[in-house]
Amino acid sequence: MQPQELIHTTRGDLDISLLEKLEGFDETDNEKIWWTEFRMIGEDEIIRRDVHMELKKSVFSNGVSAEF
Amino acid sequence: MANTQAFCSQAKVDFMNGVHNLSADALKAALYLTTATVNAASTVYSVTGEASGTNYVAGGVAVTTATAPALAGTTAHFTPSASIVYTNVTLATAFDAVLLYNSTPAGNNAISVHTFGPQTVTAGNFTLTMPVNDGATGLVRIA
C-alpha cells in the first residue's frame, strides 16, 4: 500500500492524491506572497489555503535633532 | 475605512515614558480586516475590526522577541526574532493588516501597523516572515 500524505482541510485530513494543488507567487513594493490552494479534484471549493508573506517595508519614525 | 501602515503616534510618547521594553515585554500581533481602521492614530489593541475565524484567538499571537533592539549608526531598530505564524486558521473574510502591540502594559499599547495585500486563509497557516533586522530594513525603526 502506498504511504499516504495527509493534508488538513476543511473536510478533515485528506490524502493528497485526492486533491488538486495550485501555487502562486506575487510581489509588490510592500511584500512577497507565496500561496498554496487545495481543492478536491473536479470541484471548485478551496478546502485549504496557506499564505506565506514576507514584509519588505518597515515602519520608520524620523527623529528630530535637539534644537537650541 | 482602510488600514494604513504606520509607526503609531502614541507609541512615540510611550517610548519616551518608558512604557515599552521590546527586549522584555510580551508583544503580540493581531490581524485586521480590510474594513477596519488601524493606522498611526491607533493607540491600543482593539477587537474592533479584528479578523476572526476558526483557531484565531482574539488578540492575535505572541511575537518572539529574542533579539534586543539595536543601534545601526543613528537608527535604532527592532525586528521580531521569528516569523509570526497563525496556525491552522480559517479566516474567510479578507484581512490586510497586522497590529504589533505590547500586551505587558494593562492598556495593550499599540506600536506599529503593517499592511499587505488582502488575504484569506482556509484551514491553513498564515506566516509573516520578518525583514532583515538592520538599520535600513528592521521592522520598527527610529532615526
Image (cartoon, coloured by chain):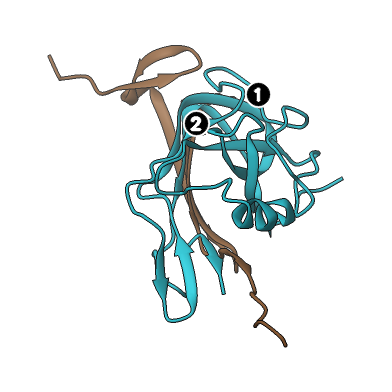
Chain colours: A brown, B cyan
Q: Which mark is residue B61?
A: 2
Q: Chain of mark 2?
A: B
Q: Find disc 1 in the rendering and name its residue.
A: B52
Q: Chain of mark 1?
A: B
Q: Secondary structure at mark 2?
A: strand
Which residue is rendered at x = 79% and y = 39% of the image? B36
C-alpha gap between disc 1 and disc 2: 13 Å
- Res A59 → quadrant: bottom right
Looking at the picture, does residue B87 appear above or below residue B23?
Answer: above
Asked if residue A64 shows in the view, the reply is yes
Q: Which corner quadrant holds the C terminus of chain B? A: bottom right
Number of numbered discs on residues: 2
Q: Is residue B76 left or right of residue B4?
A: left
Q: Is residue A28 left or right of residue A2?
A: right
Q: Residue furthest front?
A: A68
Which residue is rendered at x = 60% and y = 55% of the image? B15
Give the image location of residue B116, x and y in percent: 63, 53
Of residues B108 and B115, the one drawn nearer to the viewer in this rendering: B108
Which residue is rendered at x = 79% and y = 51% of the image? B41
Give the image location of residue B100, x and y in percent: 58, 44
